[in-house]
Image: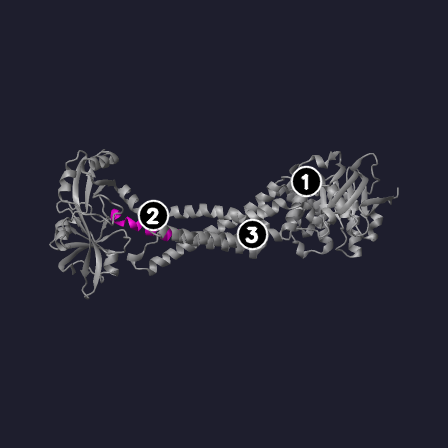
């Protein structure tokens, strides 16, 4: 009877295509919104992604998100270094600065200062074959390549810019994760950054810690907190805390929920209405099948098969359109603004969501089929 | 299946037994007694025609006998099976094995070809698609539609569609065949031809055929005619000659 169900479905081409379009549209809307949402939320802890190497981040209390840090005394660094289990600890400077470009315009940037000695915690990827030692060149800075092109006047290695009135030499380009505020990221040494930034009583933002081999990171975090009174997080922990801060404190999740729900409603409305109309148009024939001995279970299975087949096709088309849209976005959007992602996990979540949407959309059809009196064929 | 010559009904085998069957629709002042009290025996090997004015309860009686409508009271036994004793799913399975239907509007699925439509009862019973299509194809071939197996209903005449409907009603070898106004959508000559075919192929010593009809031109094909009025059988007349 599966073959009968599919032939009935494909035989009504208008409704068959209508159901697929409804599912495809819902898939596209939901997956695109999820792509943007995930990309946006990943950017909230972009700075964590952009500091490679360390296992643990130590900050002053209280810390809600990684972009809002209370500076601490430089002495804290030595206290942390003395804790058993710590292989090395280094300073990280973090502050927003004003950059003057060659054309005279100003751009706010995020300045990260790495510990002078080891330069640990540099960007995830360096371009052009350079090493982190490019920062040891006098006045040297590393700039994210995407931001260099889009927001810093297409500045290139060898060119200079002014940071808070100080001359800075671009010694290399790198690739970083996008930040939530969308600020260009500039790396330099800690002492250079401290000199360029406006003077403050304390300037140490974060202590980056590398654990000894086989050291349990959770235990080490607790030990640091207990002995120093500071807060200590693994890389995952600080990223998670920042993520949930933005989830709870901003309207981002609720707004995306609304948009995703609307996408789901669109799918249910179009697919459900068309599928119900299709079943209604075929009630006479379904009644005949019931009269000829098809049980309710058989007819329910037929309707579900029709719904699932259209659901799978619609999902495939919708994901394809979403992928194509992402490619277009990548093509036309400046690299520094490419927040949306295209992950297989999002496709999987969308697929699971579409299963529920398809089943819900077919509910009215299923009810009408179960309630159908076979005697209708004699009317 | 070979063409068979008409046979006398087997008075020793009651195919359908109705005793004081009642069925009403609606409630309160709007209640309509479609079947007031029907007592009727239908025998294996006969073609019984149910005739009567519009609204007398012919189709309702056909529906309750075929098991697609529950009656309110009374007894209906189909080859010894009490229909009220079966639940919905059991009744559906019973119908699938034992009852063949030919509907007034044919009710051929427009998305299926002739042979696929004829094979539906076998597919419902769980036959594989290939076997069901082979069997249905053989059946249609014997009905003179061997060259139109892959045609869709919209490409066929009314008489051809009715023959496909008859094939669908018989392909699974049911013990009871019910036909609701099988010639109403056909012209006189075509109607006679299809009823003649039905009589020849469907009527067997182990099978009963019930035809609801207004069409007096086909009365002579029956073995017996039961007249209905106001939800009751008022008269039965044997029309078959020895």
Residue B137: x percent and y percent? 67, 46
Furthest residue toward front: B29
Q: Which residue is mark 1?
A: B96
Circle 1 SS class: helix
Secondary structure mostly taken by the magenta-highlighted segment of the chain? helix
Q: How is the image coloured?
A: one colour
Instruction: Work out whether A354 lies above or below A324.
Output: above
Circle 2: is it few (<14), some (14-19), or many (20+) Cα within 10 Å?
few
* Residue bearing mark 3: A275
Which one is earlier in the sequence, the residue at label 2 or at label 3? 2
The span picked out in magenta is A34-49
| Residue denoted by label 2 | A248
Q: Secondary structure at mark 3?
A: helix
Question: Is residue A55 among what the camera can see?
Answer: no
Chain identifier of the residue bearing label 2 in the image: A
Q: Count the numbered circles shown.
A: 3
* Magenta span contains residue A47: yes
Residue B224 sits in quarter: top right
Of residues A312 and B232, the one drawn nearer to the viewer in this rendering: B232
Q: Label 1: chain?
A: B
- The image position of residue A240, as x and y in percent, is 30, 44
Of marks 1 and 2, the one in the foreground = 2
Q: Farthest residue toward the left? A: A138
On the picture, is A79 further left or further right than A275? Answer: left
């Amino acid at each position: 009877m599966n073959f009968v169900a599919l032939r009935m479905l494909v035989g009504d081409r208008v409704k068959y295509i209508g159901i697929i379009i409804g599912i495809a549209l819902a898939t596209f809307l939901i997956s695109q919104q999820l792509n943007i949402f995930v990309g946006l939320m990943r950017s909230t802890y972009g700075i964590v992604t952009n500091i490679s190497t360390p296992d643990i981040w130590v900050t002053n209390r209280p810390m809600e998100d990684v972009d809002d840090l209370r500076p601490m005394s430089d002495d804290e660094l030595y206290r942390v270094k003395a804790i058993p289990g710590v292989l090395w600890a280094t300073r990280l400077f973090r502050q927003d600065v004003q950059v003057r470009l060659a054309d005279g315009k100003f751009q706010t940037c995020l300045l990260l200062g790495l510990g002078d000695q080891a330069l640990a915690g540099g960007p995830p990827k360096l371009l052009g074959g350079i090493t982190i030692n490019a920062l040891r060149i006098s006045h040297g800075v590393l700039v994210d390549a995407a931001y260099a092109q889009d927001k810093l006047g297409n500045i290139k290695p060898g060119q200079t810019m002014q940071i808070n009135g100080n001359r800075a030499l671009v010694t290399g380009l790198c690739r970083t994760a996008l930040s939530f505020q969308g600020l260009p990221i500039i790396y330099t040494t800690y002492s250079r950054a401290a000199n360029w930034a406006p003077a403050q009583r304390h300037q140490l933002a974060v202590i980056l810690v590398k654990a000894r081999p086989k050291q349990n990171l959770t235990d080490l975090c607790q030990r640091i907190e207990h002995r120093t009174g500071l807060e200590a997080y693994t890389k995952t922990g600080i990223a998670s805390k920042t993520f949930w801060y933005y989830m709870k404190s901003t309207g981002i999740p609720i707004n995306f929920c609304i948009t995703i729900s609307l996408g789901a409603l669109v799918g249910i409305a179009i697919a459900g209405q068309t599928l119900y109309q299709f079943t209604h148009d075929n009630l006479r024939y379904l009644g005949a099948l019931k009269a000829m001995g098809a049980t309710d279970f058989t007819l329910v299975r037929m309707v579900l098969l029709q719904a699932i087949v259209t659901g799978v096709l619609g999902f495939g088309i919708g994901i394809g359109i979403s992928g194509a849209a992402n490619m277009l976005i990548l093509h036309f959007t400046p690299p520094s603004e490419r927040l949306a992602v295209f992950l297989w996990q999002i496709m999987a979540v969308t697929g699971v969501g579409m299963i529920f949407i398809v089943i819900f959309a077919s509910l009215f059809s299923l009810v009408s089929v179960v309630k159908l009196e076979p005697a209708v064929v004699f009317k | 299946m070979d063409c068979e010559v008409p046979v006398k009904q087997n008075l020793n085998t009651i195919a359908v037994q109705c005793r004081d069957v009642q069925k009403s629709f609606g409630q309160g002042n709007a209640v309509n007694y479609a079947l007031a009290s029907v007592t009727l025996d239908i025998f294996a090997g006969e073609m019984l025609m149910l005739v009567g004015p519009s609204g007398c309860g012919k189709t309702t009686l056909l529906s309750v006998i075929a098991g697609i409508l529950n009656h309110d009271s009374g007894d209906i036994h189909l080859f010894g099976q009490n229909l009220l004793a079966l639940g919905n799913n059991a009744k559906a399975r019973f119908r699938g094995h034992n009852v063949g239907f030919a509907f007034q509007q044919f009710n051929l699925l427009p998305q299926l070809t002739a042979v696929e439509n004829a094979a539906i009862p076998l597919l419902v019973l769980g036959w594989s698609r290939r076997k069901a299509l082979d069997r249905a194809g053989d059946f249609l071939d014997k009905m003179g539609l061997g060259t139109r197996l892959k045609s869709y209903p919209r490409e066929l005449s009314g008489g051809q569609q009715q023959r496909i409907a008859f094939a669908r009603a018989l392909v699974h070898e049911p013990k009871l065949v019910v036909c609701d106004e099988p010639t109403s959508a056909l012209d006189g000559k075509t109607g006679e031809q299809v009823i003649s075919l039905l009589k020849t192929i469907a009527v067997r010593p182990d099978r009963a055929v019930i035809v609801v009809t207004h069409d007096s031109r086909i009365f002579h094909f029956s073995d017996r005619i039961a007249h209905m009025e106001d939800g009751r059988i008022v008269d039965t007349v044997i029309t078959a000659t020895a």
